Amino acid sequence: MNQNVNLDNPKFTYALLAPKYWGVWIGFGLLALFVNAMPYSWLLAMGRGLGKFSMRFAKGRVRTARRNLELAFPEMSQIEIDRFVLENFKNTGAGLVETGIAWFWPTCRFKRHIIEHNTQPLRDYEEQGKGVLLCCVHALNLEITARAFAVIGLSGYGVFRPHDNPAYNFIQYWGRTHNGNRVVDRKDLKQMVRVMREGDRLFYLPDHDYGKKNAAYVPLFAVEDACTTTGTSILAKLSKCGIVIGSGFRNQQGKYDIMADKAIDADFPQRDAVAAAGYMNKFVEELILRAPEQWMWLHRRFKHESNPDYKVGRRYK
């Protein structure tokens, strides 16, 4: 992988040790100690318990998850939705623990929980020296997935959103990059394109509602006008990259199934932004349905509508 992309990465300074940041350092220190001291089965159980407990205080998020499911799967009964939301919040709590695992576990322990399935499309493009847009979704264990690709020798660049708290930002950056991955600022389109033109991989998540700018209204599950980013086609057109879909969901045995099993660029309609967004959403659906209870349903995925007269979030009122 190319090392010549220069990014404005957060650096450690003694100013980060100021008392106002002690809470951040202590919190992450305790998380690191906790995930390394406990057996995995205990970590997962406690994380899931925390997620269930959090439902008492996250009523708005619970309503959002329910509404998303009503919109996406209108055939589901309220009993099925309630059960699904409970499982989803358990996995949300587990996701917090899994972030600690991804950032702080030693590689020898981490590798024991990774199962590599079909990643041949990525390896084929690597042999060709061709950059790849690796399209994943917002799985609740996304940090695990990103590190797992690095561990199996398929590291790449993640799209990074800097945190307002500089101590948190430094730890977040370190957690995501010290195992082989690198990052590029989410607003830096030129760097994203450069990464792939130089033969690297860029992790990309086209499954959320990012707003009306650079978006198309195309079907996603039962919602006919889901606001969907056109960034996939923009990046593909500018970089002439390969496009592969990938995932890393947790299975029943507590292992993480790492897949990058389909190259979809051959038929990707990159010159038609609307058609490309709709095409991408078919694969987003496929990825989510691999483990739907592990996807981020608490995000207001359908808040923007195609009718400009409708207020943002009308579906959730």
Image (cartoon, rainbow, N blue to C red):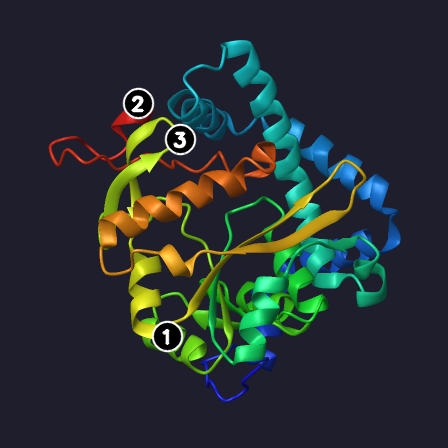
Of marks 1 and 3, which one's residue comes earlier in the chain?
1
Vertical relation: 125 (above or below) 2: above
Q: Are marks 1 and 3 in contact (CB under 8 Å)?
A: no
Using the rendered view, name the quadrant where residue 68 is placed: top left
Q: Where residue 247 sits: x, y (%)? A: 59, 50
Residue at the far front: name it: 266
Q: Amino acid at mark 2?
A: Lys
Give me the disc on residue 193.
1
Determine the residue positioned at 80% across, 52% down. 113
How much space separates mark 2 and mark 1, taking CA atoms?
Answer: 39 Å
How much space separates mark 1 and mark 3, taking CA atoms?
Answer: 30 Å
Identify the residue under disc 3: 221
Residue at the far bottom: name it: 4
Of marks 3 and 2, which one's residue comes earlier in the chain?
3
Q: Is residue 25 visible?
A: no
How much space separates mark 3 and mark 2, taking CA atoms?
Answer: 21 Å
Q: Where residue 236 sits: x, y (%)? A: 35, 66
**Along the horizontal axis of the image, is 94 left or right of 273?**
right
Vertical relation: 143 (above or below) 7: above
Q: Nearer the viewer, mark 2 or mark 1?
A: 1
Q: Nearer the viewer, residue 90 or 55?
A: 90
Q: Amino acid at mark 3?
A: Phe
Using the rendered view, name the quadrant where residue 15 is placed: bottom right
Q: Nearer the viewer, residue 97 or 169?
A: 97
Q: Residues within 10 Å of mark 3 (few under 14, many from 20)?
A: some
Q: Amino acid at mark 1?
A: Val
Identify the residue under disc 2: 317
Task: Count the labels in the image.
Answer: 3
The quarter of the picture where the C terminus appears is top left
Q: Where residue 36 sits: x, y (%)? A: 83, 56
Q: Where residue 274 sits: x, y (%)? A: 23, 48
